[in-house]
Amino acid sequence: MFYEAFMLPARICILLCIAAVSYVYAEKHPRAGFLIYKGAWFDVEYPRDFTVKPSIASSTPGKFDSAFFESPDKDVRFYVFSPQWSGEALDIAMNPVSEVEKDVKKESKDGTTRRWFTYAARNGSRARSFLEITTAETKLVFGFEYADQASYKKYLDSYLHFKKSIAQYAD
């Protein structure tokens, strides 16, 4: 009887320890086929064969608040903007000469505003879709630029993993 009463808590403890070690390992080791990019105030996983192009410099020397991640075939680019608190993602501003804004949707709930929007090239050559998440103190922007629907579909799973992998930090 004592043995059975002791074994259940011991098994639960062992399972919790395994789960904790797995979580810590996953936090420091990206999914197969992905690498970790470390921005000034965030980490994000991106496909191993993509090229990283840091963009907006952070107030933290040598670090960046945003970056682009380009596919080897140059058909898609992923984007993230995650400053320490808030700011403007000026590196993704729409070019009114060559682009039009479309598919705008905005939703506010519990102090968080989500805005989805797309900039489409006037000549139909590319589209850039973004999700901007803002609170009173913070801003986070994800972007997915694609040449066509085939490219969009080809890289969609990688983009969804990219978005899901974000880890944000503050001081």
Image: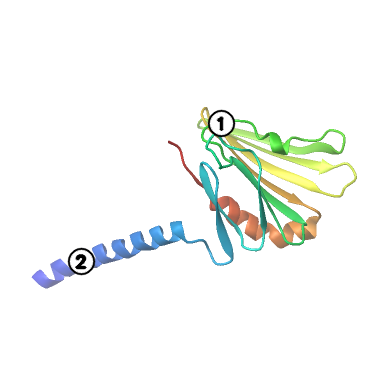
Of the numbered discs 2 and 1, the one sitting upstream in the chain is 2
Depth check: give the residue in front, 106 or 90: 90
Residue denoted by label 1: 86
* Residue farthest to the right, as pictured: 123
**Quick check: 151 above or below 145?**
below
Residue ID at (53%, 42%): 40
Query: Is residue 20 at all visible to an observer of this figure?
Result: yes
Residue 161 on image: x %, y %: 58, 56
Disc 2 and disc 1: Cα gap in Å? 46 Å
Q: What colouring style does the render use?
A: rainbow
Residue ID at (74%, 56%): 152
Image quadrant holding the N terminus, namely: bottom left
Instruction: Tell me the kind of residue under disc 1.
Output: Ser
Residue 127 on image: x %, y %: 79, 47
Residue denoted by label 2: 10
Image side of residue 87 versus residue 21, left or right: right
Quarter residue 139 falls in:
top right
Image side of residue 71 versus residue 41, left or right: right
Helix, strand or loop under label 1: loop
Image side of residue 63 versus residue 50, left or right: left
Instruction: Tell me the kind of residue under disc 2.
Output: Ala
